Image: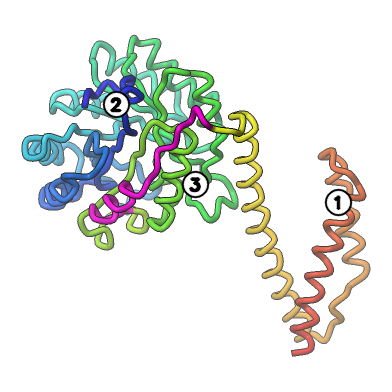
């Protein structure tokens, strides 16, 4: 398959970029690649060499040491190669080693100066460059990273949606906020957008459903982490699939005809956002009830009544003020919080009478 990712839509199927989160050893890289042979849609083999980690005690990748391993993968399997870059030196090493695709990660995209430096280092090459969304949900920052590359004459581009790190993102590692990649498509109609369900889910059990959702929404491909022995991986153990599991998931995905979609894309975008917010509301309500139960246990120990009128009056009044400031109807807020309070008291009553 031509690695000009702008041709993905003409390929007849979504692109798949798969491989381990990080290259750990020659054996691990080659065994994983060989096990991935025959995977449907497989476009390129990915492996992280330079891993930007939160803490320096964590495994930060093998660096340039892993490039010969990847070249061997290419020779043995014929796979194209994809590697994350975070600074100009990484670009030089990848270009010298025949890497076919590089991507700028979520932590790098947030820094326009770094993106500019990388763009200048890439200028004049025909390598495919993918831009992951920034960690925070900032569409302009994501679009800006792409524009900085275009400014340097780089046209072989794609974007990768890997979700966003926000408070209460459960059940995801990074909440998808699908409306943002869909809006990016409006910014750049010809730009392929792939989805990274591994980083969105953070859990291999979620990868199938996230992948299907991405394809249903017209994403042009998937980027999925796969390791020949996931439970022994040095990074992201929970989200990596074995090659066998990956093949099964890809074989089970359905490609739908987007021309037959009955729901207008704009409406669907907002419905997706509502679904995600509803999930977050349920997670928050569950956490609130857990805290109410803890309070109930303390009240029982101290022989206090479940209902504390002064406390409830203060809570409700503060919620009403905040709700009105957010342009919510006062009666609506009053009803919601009285229902929540009733449920909390019910749980505390059960604890007191146990």
Which residue shows up at 43% across the image and 44% down it?
212
Rendering quarter of residue 339: bottom right
Answer with mark 3 or mark 1, whichever residue precedes in sequence: 3
Residue range in magenta is 240-260
**Residue at the bottom extreme, as displayed:** 354
Please give left or right for residue 324 compared with residue 153 in the image. right
Residue 333 numbered mark, or none = 1
In the rendered structure, are the residues bearing label 3 and label 1 in contact, judged by CB atoms less than 8 Å apart? no
Q: Secondary structure at mark 3?
A: loop
Q: Assign the magenta stretch its main secondary structure.
A: helix
Which residue shows up at 40% across the image and 51% down it?
208
Which residue shows up at 24% across the image and 16% down it?
126
Residue 249 position within the rendered picture, expressed as x and y whole percent measured from the top left: 33, 51
For disc 3, the marked residue is 174
The Cα–Cα distance between marks 2 and 1, rounded to whole angstroms, is: 51 Å
Tell me the crowding category of disc 1: few under 14, some 14 to 19, or many 20 or more residues within 10 angstroms, Cα based.
Answer: some
Which residue shows up at 53% across the image and 45% down it?
175
Is residue 289 something one can see in this rendering? Answer: yes
Is residue 235 something one can see in this rendering? Answer: no
Answer with mark 2 or mark 1, whichever residue precedes in sequence: 2
22 magenta-colored: no
Seen in the picture, residue 120 relative to 53 is either above or below; the reply is: above
Please give left or right for residue 302 compared with residue 234 in the image. right
């Amino acid at each position: 398959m031509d690695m000009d990712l702008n041709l993905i839509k003409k390929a007849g199927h979504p692109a798949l970029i798969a491989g381990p989160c990080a290259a750990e050893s020659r054996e691990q890289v080659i065994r994983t690649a060989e096990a991935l042979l025959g995977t449907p849609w497989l476009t390129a083999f990915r492996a992280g060499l330079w891993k930007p980690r939160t803490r320096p005690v964590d495994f930060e990748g093998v660096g340039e040491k892993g490039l010969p391993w990847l070249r061997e993968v290419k020779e043995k399997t014929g796979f194209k190669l994809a590697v994350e870059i975070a600074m100009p030196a990484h670009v030089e090493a990848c270009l010298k080693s025949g890497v076919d695709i590089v991507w700028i990660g979520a932590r790098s995209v947030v820094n326009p100066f770094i993106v500019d430096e990388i763009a200048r280092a890439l200028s004049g090459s025909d390598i495919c460059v993918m831009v992951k969304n920034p960690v925070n949900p900032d569409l302009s920052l994501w679009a800006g990273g792409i524009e900085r590359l275009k400014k340097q004459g780089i046209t072989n581009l794609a974007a990768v949606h890997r979700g966003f790190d926000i408070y209460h993102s459960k059940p995801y590692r990074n909440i998808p906020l699908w409306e943002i990649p869909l809006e990016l498509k409006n910014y750049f109609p010809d730009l392929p957008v792939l989805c990274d369900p591994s980083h969105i889910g953070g859990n291999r059990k979620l990868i199938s459903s996230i992948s299907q959702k991405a394809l249903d929404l017209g994403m042009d491909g998937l980027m999925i982490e796969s390791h020949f022995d996931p439970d022994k991986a040095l990074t992201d153990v929970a989200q990596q699939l074995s090659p066998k599991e990956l093949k099964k998931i890809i074989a089970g995905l359905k490609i739908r005809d987007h021309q037959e979609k009955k729901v207008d894309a704009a409406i669907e975008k907002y419905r997706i956002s509502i679904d995600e917010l509803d999930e977050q509301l349920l997670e928050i309500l569950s956490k609130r009830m857990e805290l109410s139960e803890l309070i109930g246990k303390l009240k029982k120990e101290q022989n206090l009544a479940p209902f504390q009128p002064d406390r409830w009056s203060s809570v409700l009044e503060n919620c009403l003020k905040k709700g009105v400031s957010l342009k919510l109807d006062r009666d609506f807020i009053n009803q919601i919080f009285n229902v929540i309070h009733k449920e909390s008291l019910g749980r505390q009553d059960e604890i007191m009478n146990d």
